[in-house]
Image: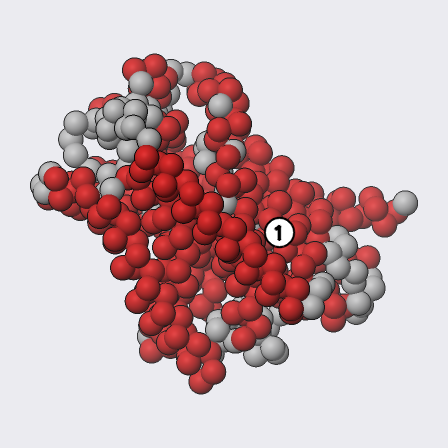
Amino acid sequence: MSMRTERPGGTESGESTAPGRAGNAAEEAGRAPAEAAEGAERATGAGRLPLLDVLRGLAILGTLGMNIWLFAGPGGELGILDRDMPTLASAAADPGAGAVAEALFRLAMNGTSLSLLTLLFGAGLAVQYRSARKRGLPWPGPYKWRALFLFFEGLVHFTLVFAWDVLMGYAMTALVAAWLLARGPRVRVAAAAVAGTVHVALMGVGTALLAASPDTTGGEGGASAELVRLYAEGTYPEQVAARLENAAVLRLEPVMTFGLLLALFLCGVFLFRAGAFSPGAQGRRLRVRMAVWGLGTGVPMKAAASLLGGDWFLIERYAAAPVAAIGVAGLVGLVLDRAQRTGPVVRALSDLGRVALSGYVLQNVLAMLACYGFGLGLAARFADSGPWWVIALWAAIGAVLLAGSTLWLRRFRHGPLEAVQKAALAGTARRRTAR
């Protein structure tokens, strides 16, 4: 998910507009999908769209807000397979301050940020399609190499860092969404409707099966002793091996939610083309609708699912959260419409959004080093001390990401992983041109 380095006043430095040049094709192919989302900052000739950078920055912090509990819980990232996630229902049964705070924190983060990232991915894809058409480039054409490279990045990230990587699923969905972009609007609407309907039906069936099945997880602390030992005392190679041994189960989420990913991609395309991320009266009207409908529907749905307990996890994360994410995008847009866009908070979030791929991977690396036994071992050290240290760790890593992205962009045009991706794909394009 590399980020373009377009400056506030115009186009990306060094970008040429002559159609058909191999260098342009290589550069267009070399931008990663998160960079595509940043590319959406260019509206119909109106310049940057700061809202997209800020939304990506918030989404990166939000994904950390959910993932941090996986690193900090018993059995680490694999422990979630053996234990239930705290919900409003469990907090009501044990209404201590810590239990309530954790349940509310998880409620806000669970699924919402992931859906927001997916929505922005679709908006960026629409920008890339339009840019390719203006340049006379084939579509999806070179874009498929970007998607395949993103899949490779996700595979490395999954193997070496984090079992619940999202990049691989994004890459495969992007290939289908890119193909649909070259079709008519009726085809896209039909595809989104079918994908969304099938997804909701699957989540309903899955929820019914969970509700009908006996509870075999053993509760919140039900991670097996073997998993607890692996992440509290095991070596890094042992943990890598555990991910690979359980790859079939750990890669099930992007397969199970393919319909949701595709529907959100296409929803992002629609919102971008409708002007939902652009300044002006039309954009504000759309953002009002997004905020009212998304938050007014999605938040009560999420809260109700959480109150019903862990058996409703699929509905909360994969049905209600996407609706709430649309509302969050609208609300943040309305706040930025009235706020000082160049303030330090907005600038820091925007900088993090511009290096989203590096930020996403770095946050998981830092959490891994902080929580697991081969690093600082904080998860075992604070295992019985409540949720407050986890929230503090999220805030600390978030501060590192915000400050680090700003400092990095003062000296470099791209994030570190974005630069690697750009160079690799530019080299691939040059080799194809030389044949």
Which residue is pictured at 53% across the width and 27% down the height? 248
Look at the image and tell me whether residue 319 can be seen. Answer: yes
Position in image of residue 312 (x %, y %): 31, 44
Q: Secondary structure at mark 1?
A: helix
Task: Give percent across and percent down for residue 344.
Answer: 34, 64
Q: Residue furthest bottom?
A: 281
365 relative position to 244: left or right: left
Q: Is residue 107 above or below residue 349?
A: above
Q: Position of residue 404 (x, y in %)?
A: 41, 48
Is 373 above or below relative to 131? above
Q: Nearer the viewer, residue 183 or 426?
A: 183
Residue of label 1:
174
**Picture residue at 47% right of the left edge, 54% below the top:** 117
- Residue sitting at 41 percent across and 40 percent down? 206
Asked which quadrant contains residue 192, the reply is: bottom right
For badge 1, the amino acid type reads Ala
Query: Quick one: quadrant of the C terminus?
Result: top right
Return the residue nearer the eye: 271 or 216: 216
Image quadrant assignment for residue 345: bottom left
Q: Residue at x 42, y 80 (%)?
A: 285
